[in-house]
Amino acid sequence: MKIPTLSKNTWLGLVAAAVVGGSGAAILVNSTLNNQPNPQSSAPSSINQVSQSPTATRAVDGQLAVYWIESSKNKLVAVPIAVKAKSNDEAIASVIKTLISENPPESNLYSAIPANTQVLSAVTKNKEIRINFSKDFTKGGGSASMQGRIIQVLYTATSLEPDAKVYLSVEGKPLKYIGGEGLEVPQPMTRKDFALEF
């Protein structure tokens, strides 16, 4: 059996086609990424009864905040961004929903919480916060992502009461472990259980 050989001109033609095709794909992807809407202006401020500060003001303890994730110096850091709630009764559920459904106010921030996650309930009583999520909360991501979403929820939920105890559940069942590597989720948990940098 004889293996066919390609002439020099055929090889040059194939290489030229690959270069042109690859360049075209790169230009298409780059233009698609550059034409995405501005995250600061794409999310209406009325979603979930919460509005983020237009200038992405960093929050301080005791101020209602949404904690976004930022990659900085080979570490992940939870960054508090101040928000205002129109209803104190639903402030915690509103800010958690903000993490899920809205774009971060700065391009270097993101949420580790899966987009399809639903907040089924959020109840605050006597410095205890109980949040019940849909099963989507536990899906996708590696150990850093799992730790990031726990930290985001913990710090966001306790932004008004930094010493509050937080209980997490999924579909009504206490969340004991999350992710394939089995990150333990203490019940209750406080800010002392998880650092902002991880």
Image: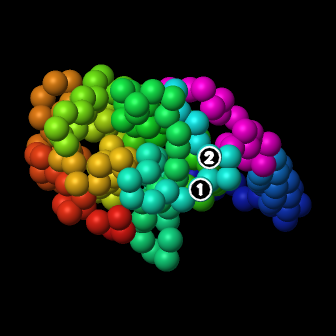
Nearest to the observer: residue 122 or residue 34: 122
Amino acid type shown at disc 1: Thr
Asked if residue 7 can be seen in this view, the reply is: no
Give the colour scheme shown: rainbow
Is residue 41 magenta-colored? yes
Indicate whether 194 appears above or below 154: below
Which quadrant holds residue 170? top left
| Mark linked to residue 135 | none
Q: Going by the image, does 12 lie left or right of 146?
A: right
For image coordinates 42% across by 65% down, the residue present is 76
Evaluate if marks 1 and 2 touch, with contact meaning CB atoms under 8 Å apart: yes
Nearest to the observer: residue 192 or residue 26: 192
For image coordinates 16% across by 24% down, the residue present is 172
Asked if residue 55 can be seen in this view, the reply is: yes
Amino acid type shown at disc 2: Ser
What crowding class fits label 2: few (fewer than 14 Cα within 10 Å), some (14-19), or many (20 or more)? some
- SS label for mark 1: loop
Which quarter of the image is occupied by the C terminus?
Answer: bottom left
What crowding class fits label 1: few (fewer than 14 Cα within 10 Å), some (14-19), or many (20 or more)? some
| Mark linked to residue 57 | 1
| Residue occupied by mark 2 | 53
Nearest to the observer: residue 49 or residue 39: 49
x, y percent for residue 3: 63, 55
Which span of residues is magenta-colored?
Answer: 33-48
For image coordinates 12% across by 29% down, the residue present is 173
x, y percent for residue 86: 51, 29
- SS label for mark 2: loop
